[in-house]
Image (cartoon, rainbow, N blue to C red):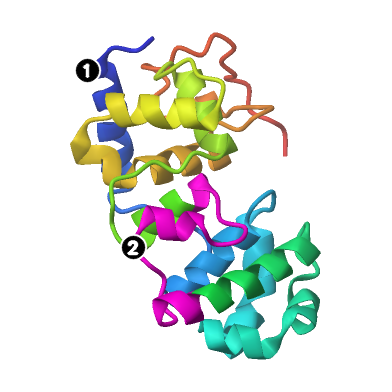
Amino acid sequence: MLSLSAIEEIFKKLSDINPAPTTELEYTNFYTLLVAVVLSAQSTDKGVNKATRSLFEKVSTPQQMVELGEENLKQAIKTIGFYNTKAKNIIGLSEILIQEHGGQVPQNREALERLPGVGRKTVNVILNTAFGEPVMAVDTHVLRVANRLGICAAKTPLEVEKALMEKIPHAYLQHAHHWLILHGRYICQARKPKCYLCPVVDLCEYKEKNFVKSKG
């Protein structure tokens, strides 16, 4: 496992390259961010953005979403995986936001976790991106990169989250999961990591480093 000083150096380098990373999901307010994150489960940000650009031009509040209705929402997001279930959850969470939170997205973990279709990762994205809380949202990229680098040796998202919260210096926690997601998405990819582009390759403990550039 990497030393705490090596972990700090990794995040210092990532910070120097990209001082203010954020989600690649497109949104117009905290509510549309919540909808986009719910839609992104087991889907790509690119695919979600393609579906929501026109949707968010018409719908930007829970009330507008409820008025749109589940069937129309399904048509708007039908290119996204599991769109039937996601549409049902989005209408359901919109109704709860109207009834219990004045149409606003609450800055409260327990309240967010009670919303349909909202799990721990989604809650952490909202608390971090919308409200600036230094929490760790763990997706497949974060889990893979954290283990490959040698920051932790954990098998579940919750284990990875706890390890990262303990080991990453507080000064870097605010943006840490964004750095890890982007690093996993564009450099430390699952099948063929681009180690020849990696700014922290000298600190990484991954044994199967790939320095061969693909052709084309």
Magenta region includes residue 71: no
Report the residue at 41% width, 71% height from top.
105
Rendered position, 145 above or below 78: above
The amino acid pointed to by label 2 is Gln
Q: Is residue 110 left or right of residue 44?
A: left
Magenta region includes residue 116: yes
Report the residue at 55% width, 26% height from top.
156
Q: Quadrant of residue 112?
A: bottom left
Q: Which residues are magenta?
A: 97-122
Q: Position of residue 35 (x, y in %)?
A: 57, 68
Q: CA distance from mark 1 to mark 2?
A: 33 Å
**Disc 1 and disc 2 in contact, CB within 8 angstroms:** no
Circle number at residue 48:
none
* Quadrant occupied by the N terminus: top left
Q: Is residue 109 left or right of residue 114?
A: left
In this rendering, the label closer to the viewer, 1 or 2: 2
Rendered position, 96 above or below 57: above
Q: Which residue is mark 2?
A: 107
Count every numbered label the image shows and give the total.
Answer: 2
Report the residue at 51% width, 84% height from top.
61
Q: Secondary structure at mark 2?
A: loop
Circle number at residue 5:
1
Q: Secondary structure at mark 1?
A: helix
* Quadrant occupied by the C terminus: top right
Q: Position of residue 203 (x, y in %)?
A: 36, 17
Q: Is residue 72 left or right of residue 128?
A: right
The amino acid pointed to by label 1 is Ser
